[in-house]
Image (tube, grey):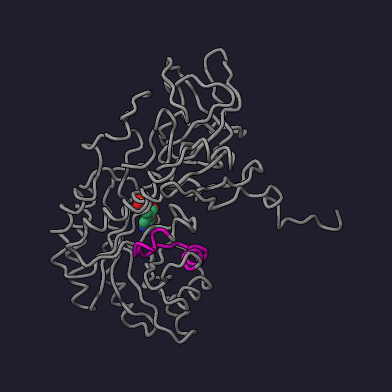
């Protein structure tokens, strides 16, 4: 469930008409719902209540300060993958003591910064990284809390580019090597073995791969916890969302009834996993990004031109793959709906951006209401891995972002001033 719906034929976010936001802020424009962000966090939090747990929102999914503030106010911790993300969390008022630091390439300076901020744990992805963390901690006369990221070699049955928990992937330490590496880690003077972590992939729509991975890793976690006095086990992120709610265009009720059968709900997830995790007696961390932010945001775009070629009806919009790269990168599906509800005939449409790449395509041969120049469209489910993956390719400024709460709305990232796109570049005097 999310808070984008038609009211009298006009798309709204909570109580705010998208039309009014477009008038004020222009396009391309990301719009986030405070209510949806909060509700998704709360649903997960409630479902996990039987466990001592901490939700660490994956900042990579949406790193806007207002989004991070919304979640930190709810008590969220954060899963970070860079010094920059930790700095964002702190700037948003988040607590570094609730942060876990993942990523295969942590630099010395990133490790030092995170140590100084007192993060909860480094999720260590290799033995050389472990050595480096120990060295940096020794230099700073600190003890680094660590957890090894175990790669359980379980197929998550998701898109190859977002699978992370098989031996084909660069992430974590092979299941068979974990015990040996912890034994070595114990001898290091400046690390403290605080827990174990895993993550098998993103956009998982079934609970089975989670359960398979948890079943495989729990006995190891139990053994190591006893041996080293662990405090936590993190089961990663990965809960999928519905991107394709079989939206019948013109049906005002589509947003009320997403196909529940297909959804991986927090209660389905919790019902299956809690009995497996509870006996461990450890604090359970989860690191969801997409589940919390995905359906909390849309990308609004203006139709610039419509052109028919011999074969196709191209709807050329002012958003592009630099604003939302998921369709170009993962062939991913985003529902596209008009800002003003249309009841006319549907026409086969390719919605494309202005970037000089054939991959700059949001959908192909999709039956959509006929658009004309000056119409506005919304790409739904764009709140995760949307603006966070934005770039300035083709010297296009980063899109503006707005947060809505009830009747209120606020610009939470201004459209990037065009000169800022090349700020920092210089032309040598000898040219
Ligand atoms: C270690 C880790 N944790 C959490 C996440 C967040 O995943 P999701 O957005 O699917 O919940 C990712 C995403 O790749 C990840 O690699």
Image height of 198 relative to 6, above or below = below
Residue stretch rendered in magenta on the structure: 70-90
Query: Can you tell me which quadrant of the image ligand 1 is in?
Result: bottom left
Q: Residue furthest top?
A: 310
Front-lying residue, 42 or 283: 42
Q: Is residue 169 visible?
A: no
Answer whether residue 73 is magenta in the image.
Answer: yes
Q: Residue drawn at (59%, 23%), measured in percent from left and top?
A: 373
Based on the displayed image, in which of its 4 quarters is residue 121 positioned?
bottom left
Question: As drawn, is 353 to the left or to the right of 246?
Answer: right
303 is within the stretch colored magenta: no
Q: Residue 141 or 304: which is nearer the viewer?
A: 304
Tell me where residue 206 appears, x and y as whole percent.
Answer: 23, 44
Q: Position of residue 92 (x, y in %)?
A: 48, 64
Quarter of the image for residue 47 reads bottom left
- The foreground one among 328 and 70 is 70
């Amino acid at each position: 469930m999310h808070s984008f719906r038609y009211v009298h034929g006009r798309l709204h976010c909570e109580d705010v008409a998208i039309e009014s936001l477009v008038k004020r802020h222009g396009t391309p424009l990301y719009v986030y719902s405070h209510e949806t962000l909060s509700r998704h966090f709360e649903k997960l939090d409630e479902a996990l209540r039987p466990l001592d747990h901490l939700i660490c929102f994956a900042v990579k999914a949406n790193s806007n300060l207002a989004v991070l503030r919304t979640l930190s106010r709810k008590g969220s911790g954060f899963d970070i993958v860079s010094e920059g993300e930790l700095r964002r969390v702190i700037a948003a008022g988040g607590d570094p003591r609730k942060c876990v630091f993942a990523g295969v390439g942590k630099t010395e300076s990133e490790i030092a910064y995170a140590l100084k901020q007192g993060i909860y744990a480094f999720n260590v992805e290799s033995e050389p990284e472990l050595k480096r963390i120990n060295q940096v901690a020794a230099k700073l006369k600190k003890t680094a809390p660590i957890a090894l990221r175990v790669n359980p070699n379980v197929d998550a049955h998701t898109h190859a580019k977002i699978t992370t928990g098989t031996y084909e992937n660069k992430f974590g330490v092979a299941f068979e090597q974990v015990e040996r590496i912890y034994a070595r880690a114990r001898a290091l003077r400046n690390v403290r073995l605080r827990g174990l972590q895993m993550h098998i992939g993103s956009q998982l729509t079934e609970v089975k791969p989670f359960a398979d991975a948890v079943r495989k890793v729990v006995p190891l976690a139990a053994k190591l916890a006893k041996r080293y006095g662990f405090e936590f086990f993190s089961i990663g992120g990965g809960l999928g969302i519905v991107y394709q709610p079989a939206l019948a265009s013109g049906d005002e009720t589509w947003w009320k009834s997403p196909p529940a059968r297909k959804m991986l709900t927090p209660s389905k997830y919790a019902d299956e996993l809690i009995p497996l995790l509870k006996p461990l007696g450890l604090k359970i961390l989860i690191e969801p990004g997409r589940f919390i932010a995905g359906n909390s945001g849309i990308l609004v775009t203006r139709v610039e031109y419509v052109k028919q070629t011999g074969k196709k009806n191209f709807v050329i919009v002012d958003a592009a793959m630099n604003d939302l790269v998921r369709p170009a990168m993962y062939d991913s599906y985003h529902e596209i709906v008009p800002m003003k509800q249309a009841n006319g005939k549907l026409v086969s449409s390719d919605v494309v951006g202005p970037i000089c790449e054939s991959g700059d395509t949001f959908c192909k041969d999709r039956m959509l209401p006929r658009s004309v120049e000056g119409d506005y469209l919304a790409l739904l489910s764009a709140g995760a891995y949307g603006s966070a993956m934005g770039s300035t390719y083709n010297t296009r400024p980063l899109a503006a972002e707005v947060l809505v709460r009830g009747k209120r709305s606020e610009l939470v990232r201004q459209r990037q001033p065009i000169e800022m796109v090349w700020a920092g570049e210089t032309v040598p005097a000898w040219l």
